Amino acid sequence: MTERFSPLHQTHVDSGASFTDFAGWQMPVRYSSDLAEHHAVRSHAGIFDLSHMGEILVIGPEAAEALDYALAGRLSAIEHGQAKYTLLLGRDGGVIDDLVVYRTGDDRFMVVANASNREVVVEELLQRTSPFDAEVEDESDDIALVAVQGPDALEILQQTPGFGVQGPGLDGDDFVSAVAGLKYYRSLPAEFEGGPVLIARTGYTGEDGFELYLAPERAEALWSALRETGGSRLVPAGLASRDTLRLEAGMPLYGHELGTDTFPAQAGLGRVVALGKEGDFVGREASERGPEEGARVLVGLIAEGRRAGRAGYAVFATTDAGEPVGEITSGALSPTLGHPIAMAYVAPDSAEPGTELYIDVRGTRVAASVTALPFYKRRK
């Protein structure tokens, strides 16, 4: 696989970033320390490069109907400017990818896919929408994505020069009020230094924040302007802190909590599958049947001490049980909470909040309690 680089790669190199391979992309894993970047997002703000994500346009008179068939959600019901979290299911009901879909026009949608699944999502959408009057266009290489997340994100965005709201007679003051009024999971077409940028109040950290979609050749200017405005309040953050932030917020990660062998209901995402919508959709029949009786379900686990369970660690009902009742999918010592947290799939009879289980941490069984997700909620 050929290595791929973000349009911001040289900016990250100049900032001293360490890199990791992610779905063939060389992406910054950290700049200073995982902990410092994590705490910066929780206390002030962090800036992330997410240009490896996939952006796929679905356009045409029947785009809404096509997506209703292709995806698990009712995409025809979302308004212009609204976003929706949804799932791409296999015919067997398993999760091929989790997506965010933006409606950017009456007959225009942007589907944002995980970087590792970009090609398969494009192929599935092409096949599933072929009976409809709709076109699928992979625009991933023509779109950069920068995210600003944290309590100070709004103020930093409002104070950054160069932004404006699209439309005649509008100025910077209009931008300040428009961004402030943007609701969660809504987007706003705007301008930065004369070029289009889509600003969405979405994110993957559990904090307030924004994701900004724009042309790759303008990403460096945007990144620099945000950094200069934010100063010490805005810290570059890599994939390592992004992972601990989303874990604290109880957000699933494809390949860990979600996969083709997992039904949404097992992951607590049954509500995302719109079984009440009219007509067929791919995966409907399997979703109506649901997982087999006794299938493991996703829970949160909290423990004391400093020894955290990691992905793949077995979970037991007792200290001496021979067979595990589950397995960790994601785990870490929570930087915000100060104790180990994990998400795990466990047997249904071990999933009740308050149940005491034991994580095998390198041969030692560490006590942990089942808890409802998320582990962390921001103060509003």
Image (spheres, rainbow, N blue to C red):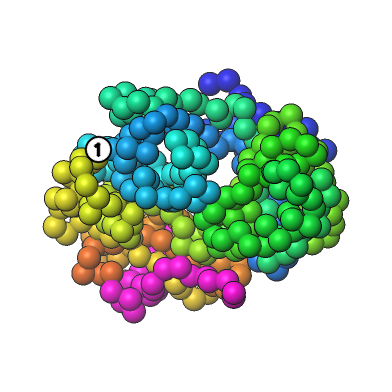
Q: Which residues are magenta?
A: 352-380
**Which residue is located at x 35 percent, y 26 percent?**
133
- Tell me if 290 is positioned left or right of 110 in this view: left
Q: Residues within 10 Å of mark 1 (few under 14, many from 20)?
A: some
Tell me where residue 200 appears, x and y as whole percent. Answer: 59, 50
Which residue position holds label 1? Answer: 282
- Name the kind of residue labelled 1 in the image: Val
Tell me where residue 198 appears, x and y as whole percent. Answer: 63, 43
Pick the residue in front: 331 or 267: 267
**Which residue is located at x 50 percent, y 40 percent?**
105
Q: Quadrant of residue 71?
A: top left
**Which residue is located at x 28 percent, y 38 percent?**
69
- Tell me if 308 is positioned left or right of 52 in this view: left
Can you say whether 69 is above or below 309 in the image?
A: above
Tell me where residue 265 appears, x and y as whole percent. Answer: 27, 56
Residue 97 lies in the magenta-colored region: no
- Tell me if 248 is positioned left or right of 195 in this view: left
- Tell me if 354 is positioned left or right of 165 in this view: left
Residue 357 lies in the magenta-colored region: yes
**Which residue is located at x 46 percent, y 62 percent?**
250
| SS of the residue under disc 1 | loop
Can you say whether 215 is above or below 331 in the image?
A: above
Can you say whether 149 is above or below 133 in the image?
A: below
